[in-house]
Image: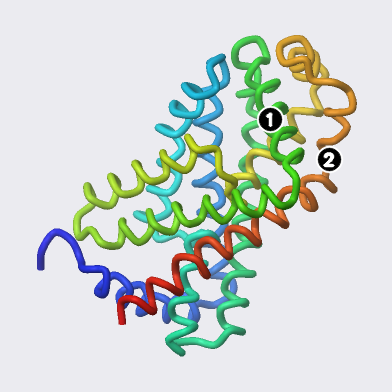
Amino acid sequence: MGTFLSPGEIVNKYIDGCDGKVKSGFAKLIGKSVLAGAFIGFGAAGSSVAAHAIADVGVARLVAGCVFPVGLMMVILMGAELFTGDCLMMMGTINKRHSILDLIRVLASVYFGNFIGGTVLAAMVYYCGQFNYSGGLLGAYTIKVAIAKVSIAPGPALVSGILCNLLVCAAVIMALASTDITGKLLACFFVIMLFVTSGFEHCVANMYYITAGLFAKLNPDYINVCVEQYGITQSQLDSLNIGTYFINNLVPVTIGNILGGGVFLGIPLAKLNK
């Protein structure tokens, strides 16, 4: 065996792996997906720390992009279940390895587990005091990021979700192509760095980012710094709430992620590499 697999071999290997996902019990799926939600959350939290005091937007995103990929590295090497990557299961669905109902059941279970993992991690990061970094600037930055995410119009949020998961699922496929750990890590790093630097929307990452912003908003000190440093208005602060979290961001971004990873990448890969 060489150091990498051909596209056809990758597709067959992923489809074979779908059998294990479908046969997994609910508790096992939830456990693995909670871990994945937390791992992606760790990448998001670390990227915020790295970027929060950098004024230049491009440099800040590039720095964040160099940290965030660690989350997907942990997901892949530790066998966790990530909703965005699992959208590739559509390859197995169209090859009749499992039913549409099996696909929906697995994706719904993984999504729920990812949400738990990201939400719990956001709460823990808030309560451990990390947002106090730089005199509360990290907390203010966390609020600003969350406000920006819930302020995206549904159409652009959906398209951004498509673009995001084209890259995330490409990273998953490329990592699967490598037969050694170094190759898997490099595949994760460069492609995920590209997605983060580009600023595309990832539903599981947003389960951390927006929840963290909601927690940070509970602290008046962070709000004061946010107003002073970023000129955030009261109406913008009010726009960050549970309703806008789900309706403005999570729903359209999730739909976009499904389309990007499953329909725009997974199905063509399966059809072109039979």
Q: In this view, does 23 lie to the left or right of 237?
A: left
Viewport quadrant of the N terminus: bottom left
User: Is residue 223 placed above or below 148 in the rendered structure?
Assistant: above
The reply, left or right, for residue 93 in relation to residue 184 is right
Q: Which of 244 and 131 is in front in this view?
A: 244
Q: Give how far across and how far down residue 69 sits, in percent.
A: 42, 41
Q: Quadrant of residue 209?
A: top right
Q: What residue type is labelled 2?
A: Asn
Q: Answer whether residue 34 is visible to the viewer in this image.
A: yes
Q: Please report the residue visible at 71 percent of the width from the left and 26 percent of the height from the top.
A: 144
Say which residue label 2 marks: 241
Q: Residues within 10 Å of mark 2 (few under 14, many from 20)?
A: some
Provide residue 96's location: percent of width, then percent of height: 46, 89
Q: Can I make out residue 50 in this image?
A: no
The residue positioned farthest toward the left in the image shown? 1
Q: Dot 1, crowdedness within 10 Å: few (<14), some or many (≥20)?
A: few
Residue 39 location, x and y as percent? 49, 46
Q: Which mark is residue 102?
A: none
Determine the secondary structure under disc 1: helix
Disc 1 vs disc 2: which is toward the camera? Answer: 2
N-terminal label among 1 and 2: 1
Q: In which quarter of the image is residue 77?
A: bottom left
Identified at 38% across, 48% down, the residue is 73
- Whole-percent x, y for residue 21 in the image: 47, 75
Kindly identify which residue carries mark 1: 127
Along the viewing direction, whichever of 20 and 159 lies nearer the viewer: 159
Q: In this view, does 206 lie above or below 5?
A: above
